[in-house]
Amino acid sequence: MNKEYVNTGRTNQKLETRNKILASAQYFLNKGLVFNLEDIANKTGISRATIYRYFSNIDILAAEAALDVSTQSPETLYDNSKGKGIEDQILEIQDYYNTLTINHENLFRKYLSAILDSSSSSPKRGARRKKTLKLVLEDTDLTNREKEDLSNLLSIYMGMEPLIITKDVCGLNNKESMELMKWGMKLLLKGLRLSKK
């Protein structure tokens, strides 16, 4: 997804267009059909050129559409964690994203490979982890800059990228990877002493 394009101009309309494109791809995926950008254009009534502004190739679109089906929205994750302490919320969010990654590891690896192979120079990821963390951090006394920096830092401890490091570089299994990332998050949170407003 070309985030620079989505975040300029009529953002809500662009997000709606992006969601239509994803829904069309999910239709083909659910039917087990092979599809291309022309098929998506015909299904949505959106031009191929417009679709290309959101997804630079069919592999990225297919992988993101498949992941989008399986992933709860940041708002839902935040709502489900309300009423808990900040640290418990963050650990619950970390557990959700790490479990999701392990359960769909092959798909995440394919998606990551597709976006890394893409020639697009714009930001390449949906950034759900960061958005979820920012929702939780809104309830803290941190400055806006601290919230931004902390959501970036905490994102490092969850998702496909740290799983690749723990498994492919360190040689850990899924359980050991989850435990190590959780331990790292706890150490980080221990030094922060976050509190609600």
Image (cartoon, rainbow, N blue to C red):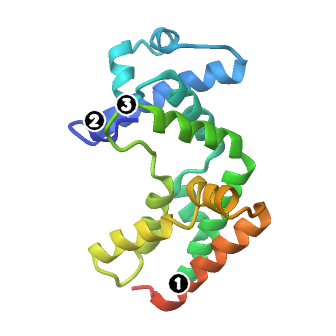
- Give the secondary structure at mark 1: helix
For the point 54% across and 26% down, the residue is: 59
Res 139 quadrant in image = bottom left
Callout 2, which amino acid?
Tyr
Q: Residues within 10 Å of mark 3 (few under 14, many from 20)?
A: few
Q: Disc 2 marks which residue?
A: 5
Dot 3 or dot 1: first in sequence order is 3
- Which residue is label 3 attached to? 119
Q: Which mark is residue 189?
A: 1
Q: Is residue 172 left or right of residue 68?
A: right
x, y percent for residue 69: 63, 38
Frontmost residue, 15 versus 152: 152
Q: In front here: 70 or 182?
A: 182
Q: Is 82 left or right of 103, judged from the image as shown?
A: left
Q: CA distance from mark 3 to mark 1?
A: 37 Å
Q: Position of residue 112 (x, y in %)?
A: 54, 41
Amino acid on which disc 1 is placed:
Leu
In which quadrant of the rendered image does the N terminus lie? top left
Res. 193 in view: no
Quick check: can you spot residue 108? yes
Secondary-structure class at tag 2: helix
Residue 184 appears in which quarter of the rendering?
bottom right
Task: Identify the image quadrant of the C terminus.
Answer: bottom left
Instruction: Identify the secondary structure beneath mark 3.
Output: loop
Decide which of tag 1 and tag 2 comes sooner along the chain.
Answer: 2
Which residue shows up at 49% across the image and 53% down it? 128
* Residue depicted at x 37% and y 30%: 119
Report whether 193 appears left or right of 122. right
